[in-house]
Amino acid sequence: MRPQSPLGGSASPKAFGARVLLSCLDCHHYHSMALEAVIKRLQDHGLGDERTGIKAVAIFVSRPCPRCGGWRFDTRPDFPEDAGAVGA
Ligand SMILES: [Zn+2]
């Protein structure tokens, strides 16, 4: 994926219930967050908006990993239209 993919994309992914996968780099625990909630948090804190690069979201995580307590995360889109392209 493109690291600078805007959260909002060009086709209003919020309409599709798009989600963001936040994964811990240390223990690989991950969870999916609603994109809408992520954007709202960015806006609430004045940190960005739907045009913020998705990779930047990892910097704004406000809680440590629930499994290992780590603070290093990676993010990637969990958009429905990508479901067949991930190859996981
Ligand atoms: Zn972890």
Image: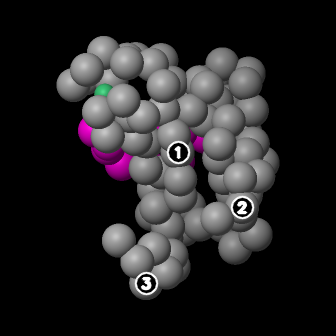
Contact check, label 3 and label 1, Cβ < 8 Å: no
Q: Where ligand 1 lies, by image quadrant?
A: top left
Quadrant where the image shows the N terminus: bottom right
Q: Secondary structure at mark 1?
A: strand
Q: Please name the amino acid that badge 2 sits on.
A: Arg
Name which of mark 2 and mark 1 comes first in the sequence.
2
Q: Please name the amino acid that badge 1 sits on.
A: Thr
At 73% from the left and 21% from the top, the residue drawn is 46
**Residue ID for mark 3:** 84
Q: Position of residue 61 (x, y in %)?
A: 51, 24
**Residue ID for mark 1:** 75
Beta carbon of the mark 1 residue lies under 8 A of ligand 1: no
Q: Secondary structure at mark 2?
A: loop
Name which of mark 3 and mark 1 comes first in the sequence.
1
Which segment did they paint magenta?
A: 29-39
Can you say whether 78 is above or below 65 in the image? below
Disc marking residue 2: 2
Does 51 sit left or right of 25 as displayed?
Answer: right
Contact check, label 2 and label 1, Cβ < 8 Å: no
Kindly report the distance in space between the C-alpha atoms of the residues bearing marks 2 and 1: 12 Å
